[in-house]
Structures are given as structure tokens and as C-alpha cells.
Amino acid sequence: MTTNETGDLRTAGVVQVLDVGCGVASFSAYLLPLDIHTMSFAPKDGHENQIQFALERGIGAMIAVLATKQLPFPSNSFEMAHCSRCRVDWHEDDGILLKEVDRLLRPNGYFVYSAPPAYRKDKDFPTIWKKLSNLTSAMCWKLIAQQVQTAIWVKPEDDLCRQQNAERKLLTLCEPEEDPVPSWRSPLRNCLRLNPDQPYFQKLPPRPERLSVYSRSLEKIGVTPEKFDKHNRFWREQVSEYWKLIGVNLTEIRNVMDMNAYYGGFSVALSALPMWVMNIVPATMSNTLSAIYDRGLIGAYHDWCVPFSTYPRSYDLLHTFHLFSHYKDHVEGCGIEDIMLEMDRMIRPQKDAVSLDHSNTLVKSTSLNVLDNRTWINSKMQCIRKFHITSCGRSFAITVTKES
């Protein structure tokens, strides 16, 4: 699919895609050679095994529901939203689901919609299409291509048209938010958000240049260029040390999760390798996920007090950076051991988890007992795993290999 007769999605400026109801993520697989990263999701329904199959293929995917809550992604994160053979009722409830897509799209972002073939014979489809057309027109989306039951709209670059339509009572604008909270379990809002950063909108380069760009998102959360460069250098060096610690064949690692991703430095350090990283920003910590998306990476908000929306044995490598320190004083039922059990659920047999944290947190809070100079065990967990430990300045890095 192209935006003109000669170009492709990269020349159209597409770097990150949201694939709604992704099936087995074949669209994402098609985009991989173009270095376009896709956040694919589908609901937990009769087709839930398709997400598991996508993960088995080594393609980034997760279970999510587009219904009453916002998706766990930051605003202005994707250059394209894609829904093929789409059965989502975008036209219902005054287009509330379509407004959620608008929240997630960057200015000049594309919405690609393809109705199921069966809709060609559906007598109600003309009515559905008319409602959809009216909604997108009110939102100032421009229809740039249409063929049979496939259509492509583009979101406007600025908010002038939307402000005019709001004055004409064609749509409702959201109240401005001074400090937007992470979209974690937040209710959908049946209104359209204006972009407060429109005068300062930053045109980001394509990958791989985007991986190292200092974005306005970093500036807004108080990260200086010097701190950003230091962060990147640290993770380049640290990842090199990790490979020595693990001693694993890198070709056997495909699905990676960074459970506390900060600014995405760990993921960028892996970007030259044939693996993808799910960057998780805990909803109770500093909101850095927008900065991660501005680097051309993908990820989601999550609270590790609840299970992550994925299948057991989905990941080849789990990574935590000072995650346990953050959760060590949480309420009962949300401690370090609970997180470790969730890690045990997500990781595949004979694969590794690496944790970098303060030594007193790792030792005291998890009751690690010394067996010899390098091997430790957790005496509280029912399923005992062996740990290998190495010093990293004032912190310790511990690698855990799950037994088969």
C-alpha cells in the first residue's frame, strides 16, 4: 500500500504503525524489512490465539481492548493506524473510538481502513460509510484514497479546521490538560484533543537517525542533552557487559521486554540486532513513554501490580532496571516476589532475565542466600531458580535462567 504511485510507506514518513485487530500480525511482518515498527494488538476473544502465534513468529504484539478505556500508549505516537478487514464500529457513539485513534496519531498521520469483504453485500454498509464520512469530515481528516472498501484518511497538520468546526458545533473539543497523566486504565473521552505543542511541533527524522534524536518530549520532562547522551553511553556499555554475563547465542533471542524502560536506551543499544523490544513504562513512575516513541521505538504503559496482557512463555529476554526498588514498599500483593512470578510466567523455558538494581534491594527484599561466590537462590519462591550476580558499581546485575 502506498500514498502515491511511486512511493512507499517510508517515503510517506511512516516509522511507527498501530495495527488494530492485527490477526497473526502479517502486516507487521511485511513492514519489518522497511524498518517500520508496528504495535499490533487484538482483543482477548475467539481469535486470541492469533496474538500468541504472532509472538511465536517473533513479531511485536499484545492483547488489548478498544472499548471503554484508552489504549496504553501516549498521544501523538504513530504515523499510521491500520485496521484491515475491520469490524470495529468506528461510527457508533459519536465516533468515540475514532477519536481515540486521533489521539494516538501524529499530525499528518494516516488512518487506513478496510472493511470485510462480506460488507459488500451488507445493506447497512452505505449507512455506516456515510456516518464514518461525516465523522471524519467533522474531525478534519482528509480522504486521500479510496478503492472498493478500502479508504485512507490523513489527520490535519494543525488545529485551525478543528477549532472552526467546534465553533460550528460539529465536534466537541476536550478541555486542555496542563500535565497529562499516562493513559493507563483511563476512560475514553468523547471529545477531540487539540495539540498544545503545535507551535513547537518537531519534525522527527526516519530511523535509524530517530533513535538518537534529542526530542522535545525529553526537554519537557527535564532531560538535558548532556543527560541524554550519558544515558545512551551507559546502555551501550551495559549491554555489552550483559552479553558477557549471560553468555547466550544472540540469534536465539527475538522477543525482548524492558520492564522499566526510562528513555529507551536499553532498546536502542539492541537496535542493530535481529530482535524487537517491548518498552514498558510503569504508570506509577515518570511519564517517559512519549520520549521513547519519539525515538522510533514501541512500548506501553503498565502497572506491575497486575499481570501484563500477554501469553505465558512469550519472551526470550526480560530486563529490569531499578524496577524492584520502585515496588519494594508497595502494598501487600504487589511486591517484588509477585513481579518475579509474573516474570516467570512471561519468560520462555531456558531463557534469561537480567535485573540491575541496588544490591540491598535485590538481596534483602528477595531473600537471596549465597551458595557460592556467584550463585544465589531465592528461598521464598516455590519454584527455585539459580541467579548469577556481578557488581556494576553501586548496583548489582543479576541474571536468572528459567529452568525447562
Image (cartoon, grey):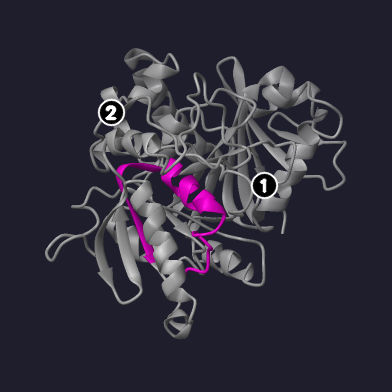
- Using the image, determine if residue 252 lies above or below residue 231: below
Q: Could you tell whether 287 is left or right of 380 in the image?
A: left
Residue 26 visible? The answer is: no
Q: Which residue is mark 1?
A: 308
Find residue 217 and report its horizontal and vertical position in percent.
39, 25
How far across and down, in percent of the image, does residue 62 sit?
Answer: 57, 55
Picture coordinates of residue 333, whole percent (x, y): 85, 35
Q: Answer with left or right where residue 200 lies relative to residue 316.
A: left
Q: Is residue 312 above or below residue 264?
A: below
Residue marked by disc 2: 201
Q: Confirm whether residue 129 shows in the render.
A: yes
The stretch drawn in magenta includes residue 107: yes
In the image, 404: left or right of 80? right
Q: Do labels 2 and 1 touch, CB within 8 Å?
A: no
User: Is 235 rendered above or below residue 147?
Assistant: above
Residue at the limit of the structure toward the front, as seen here: 168
Q: Pick whichever, 273 or 396, lies toward us.
A: 273
Mark 2, secondary structure of its residue: loop
Distance from label 2 to label 1 (Cα)? 33 Å
